[in-house]
Amino acid sequence: MFELIRRDGLARICKLDTKHGVLETPALLPVVNPRFQTIRPRELYETFGFKAIITNSYIIKNDDKMRPDALAKGLHEMLDYPGTIMTDSGTFQSHMYGEVEVKNDEIVNFQREVGSDIGTVLDIFTEPEWGYEKTSEAVDVTLERTREAASLKGEMMLAGVVQGSIYPDLRERCATELRGIDADVHPIGGIVPLMENYRYADLVDVIIASKKGLPPNRPVHLFGAGHPMLFSLAVLLGCDMFDSASYAKFARDDRYMTIERTMHLADMKGLDCDCPACVGRSIDQLKAMKPAERADLIARHNLYISKMEMDRVKRALLEGNLWELAEQRCRSHPALLDGLRRLKEHQDFMERTEPLSRDGAIFYTGPETMNRPVMHRVAKRLKERYTAPRTDVMVVFEGGEKPYSWHRADDIKAILDVADSHFYVMSEFGPVPIELDEMYPIAQSLFPSIQDRDMVDRVREQMEDLAHTHQYGLSCMYDGESTAEMLASLSKGKGKFDIDMARVRAVADYQFGKGAADALFSGKVELVKSKNTEKIRNVIVDGEHVVSMRAEDGFFTLRPPGARRLLKTFPSPRLRAVVSDDSVPFNREGKNVMCGFIIDTDEGLRPSDEVIIVDKNDDLVAIGRIILTKYEAEFFKKGLAIKTREGIKGPVTSA
Ligand code: GUN
Ligand code: ZN
């Protein structure tokens, strides 16, 4: 079973049940070479804290001493390792050395017989230089072998590998067909040559194409990815497992890993690592060591640094700043930067799992930040969902301190005294209606005050776009106090623009969809504000508390009267999760909605969106925040799907 614990977009923290413990992902599995164990498996478990390793069943099976030993004792005893053991099948040997002398059924049976926790199919390693036809046939053979492996796996979990080389449609087809096969983990294979040649943009395409097809309720393993420089980007794209042979291989020829790159020891002028292997040593000491001892030390260092980076990635995921970390890490190598830049092509796909908001602000790290799915969403929703208040005049402020409306309050008042105006801010997001200035990520983002060329050009383009499309009779850039004087001479008197009402209406349509503002706020509207901050807290309509506005992200929390209004306006399943009858009584009590109890949801809902929980008759049951998208909820069997905030007691019925 694979359970989602926390997520940020495609990135996730999950728990995978195995026969030898629960593996928390994202996880790095060190490769243990059964022939020369650079670091003993027991030490990997106890000292380093690796709860899973990967080893090669093909090597063991082909070795006349190890084979009987493994069959007699089982892998765990043979390797003296109490955690989860994954085994590979020999496919990689075929990539390295040509043909392998083993059949799929033999190697799958062998892995099961020696007690592997996760065994791997004998997939066909699709090489990047192969043509389309050959690759397509290899995908078919791999799928056929995976079906066979699934029928032989018994109690063992099965890794069904996605192949398809650099052809996105073949990757997606392979992944989609794997959905229907009873496998448990999905490695993305055939990528080692891409990584060796620093083809990270291609790697990004391969990962995304695979993710599109794979079932979201099974972990994704990036086969052969063991360099820490890649972890943050790969986790961001939804990879859960990694394996590293490099830590030991590199060490044997004096290659020392850092988070940014790999260094040759000979080129290093100093040592700045305080991992348990390096602490207290100088570079000269390291260089003077006997080769075997030095290789041992570097292997340990490489592993510590990899472990540290994986832990760093996990922390970033939990704290809501994995994007920033990945953006920073991708600057350590131009080829990685290509990988980051390629994400622009996948904005639509990534937007589907992009949360409504996250803790903490977005930090601009460079022009690539503007390609984040959240930025794409802002532009799209402003275009599709926003309706500007009807005024004669549009006044555009240059950016400045946030929240804009607060810092511009006096200027706004002066203009409204003389002209019927509405206001935009020329922000890094392009022209933003001023009433949206507290909403994520407009308020919750930090940009450098010295703008780069990309930013200047983009904002100018968007401003021109607005200049050509707006419906106002008159528009101008704010130019100090003279603006009010100029408008006084041209305009027809006082403005009625009410920023508070504009704010609640604009946020409602942005958050729930066009028409939500009309649904929620028709009637006599009363706004309750915070005494300390003067921010809107509650919206009362005809005496009913319909929504509250959150200070953190500027979005609404729904209250039952608000939910009822939305239910009346939007047809099912819009904004809803329809839950099964056996879930209803629990959700009415305020209990969370678990995976497997959802009949239908709105596919427009995004993680951490407000969701209206209803029964099959469309009666209001509860209100919560959704964790899984509609697509994901169809797959996951275990764990939380919706965090319920408020249960609604049903009508009292006699038994
Ligand atoms: N190790 C690295 N790449 C691969 C792959 O494509 N398939 C298998 N089975 N193992 C690998
Ligand atoms: Zn070190």
Image (cartoon, helix red, strand yellow):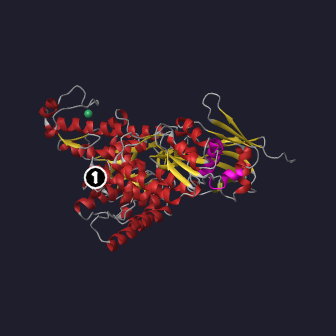
Q: Residue at x 26, y 42 (%)?
A: 37
Magenta part of the chain: 495-519
Residue carrying label 1: 335
- The answer to whether residue 70 is left or right of residue 385 is left
Image quadrant of ligand 2? top left
Q: Is residue 375 magenta?
A: no
Q: How many marks?
A: 1
Badge 1 density bin: few <14, some 14–19, many ≥20, Cα 10 Å: some
Q: Secondary structure beneath disc 1?
A: helix
The x, y position of residue 343, in whole percent, is 39, 55
Is 429 or 496 nearer to us in this picture?
496
- The answer to whether residue 502 is left or right of residue 457 is right
The x, y position of residue 607, in whole percent, is 55, 48
Q: Residue furthest top?
A: 280
**Residue 439's quadrant in the figure?**
top right
The x, y position of residue 394, in whole percent, is 55, 50
Q: Residue at x 66, y 52 (%)?
A: 516
| Amino acid, disc 1 | Ala
Q: Residue at x 20, y 27 (%)?
A: 281
Q: Residue at x 38, y 68 (%)?
A: 139
Judged by its main secondary structure, the magenta piece is: helix
**Residue 488's quadrant in the figure?**
top right
Is 538 or 39 nearer to us in this picture?
538
